[in-house]
Image: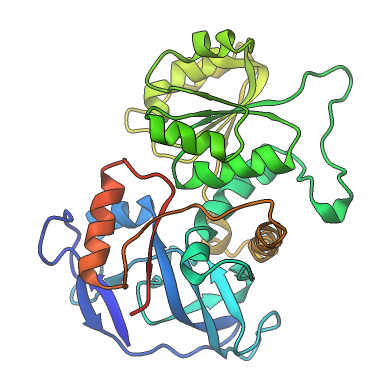
Amino acid sequence: MKAIGYLKAQSIDQSDALIDIELPTPQASGRDLLVKVKAVSVNPVDTKIRAAVSPEEGQFKVLGWDAVGEVVATGDQVELFKEGDEVWYAGDLTRPGSNAEYQLVDERIVGVKPKTLSSSEAAAMPLTSITAWELLFDRLGFTPLLPNNNGQGEHVNDGAPQPRILIMGAAGGVGSILTQLAAKITHAIVIGTASRPESQAWVRELGANHVIDHSQPLLPQLKALGIEDVSHVISLTHTDQHFEQLVETLAPQGKLALIDDPESGIDIMKLKTKSLSLHWEFMYTRSMFQTWDMQKQHDLLNSIASLIDDGLLKTTMGNHYGAINATNLKMAHTHIESHQTVGKVVLEGF
């Protein structure tokens, strides 16, 4: 099968940072599906691993943690899918990725592809959707207001003010779906941050109640909107640069969630006097540790697909880089590393 991989970690400007290769087609067993990959997207995790993680000597490493495809074979313990099903998923960080014609993936982290999206439109969303959903509903404890629960979800109780979520980096991949989820299926006031006119317009289009500029002091901008503090902060990038401001903007007993890797570290003692809580989200935890609730990722991907097909959520696809090959993937990695993306970068077909 065709695939794109590399032999050693290096910067994307090197000629062999990603190369076109041929690999044996894998065989499905156990709870694995063998998926014929139709479309993929590129995430920051791809660029970080390519730059820092080398495979074993003489072995190729295949990246890619978003895919849409067709099930072409199933393992002997598969219960949720059959051959011919169209699926989407973000895969498993510990296994070969989706930059290949065929990929093995555990059915418990796979969902049914949204019917109303093309393969490329759908490929933009699995990893970011899982991350966003787990942030809101698993880490921060919101209850999704889904059609099948008759609109019953979190409500203001005991005189508590309406939740106010500040999303740092709301125009990026995770931010683009997180903003929609928070705006459409929670009761919260949603404040997104973006620094450029085009990204600010994108965040407003996604449903944020307010948009502020994270390159400027945060609290004065919030107060200008009549918002004295926020109950929740979700920091998606550069947490270390904004940490003191995030603590300042949070109300007492507020919650701070993050997904990035603060380079200079953060001083969690600053959270103490307000009794603030800190929540990490890493969407590969369930697959990496084979947790008892691993199948929740299957369930939430199906919920996301239903919300899309019902018209409540839209694709976060930004740039389409054409066919899945080394040349186009190198361009996509370069774009991701520029930190200038709006929405997701996708590729389709081999």
Viewer-proximal residue among 201 and 67: 201
Indicate whether 252 appears above or below 266. Answer: above
Give the residue drawn at x 68%, y 59%.
300
Task: Mark yes or no: residue 320 visible.
Answer: yes
Task: Point out the residue furthest to the left here.
Answer: 15
Give the quadrant of residue 267: top left
Viewer-proximal residue among 300 and 140: 300
Q: Which quadrant: the C terminus? A: bottom left
Q: Which quadrant: the N terminus? A: bottom left
Image coords of residue 232 (percent x, y) = 63, 27
Q: Is residue 236 left or right of residue 18?
A: right
Number of marks in the rendered image: 0
Give the residue drawn at x 66%, y 82%.
81
Q: How is the image coloured?
A: rainbow
Q: Is residue 197 left or right of residue 254?
A: left
Give the residue drawn at x 39%, y 29%.
197
Q: Is residue 297 left or right of residue 45?
A: right
Image coords of residue 280 (percent x, y) = 54, 39
Task: Mark yes or no: residue 52 visible.
Answer: no
Give the residue drawn at x 72%, y 59%.
310
Viewer-proximal residue among 347 and 236: 347
Image coords of residue 22 (percent x, y) = 25, 85
Viewer-proximal residue among 170 and 209: 209
Indicate whether 45 appears above or below 268. Answer: below
Indicate whether 70 appears above or below 64. Answer: below
Image coords of residue 120 (percent x, y) = 46, 67
Indicate whether 112 appears above or below 343. Answer: below
Q: Is residue 229 left or right of residue 320?
A: right
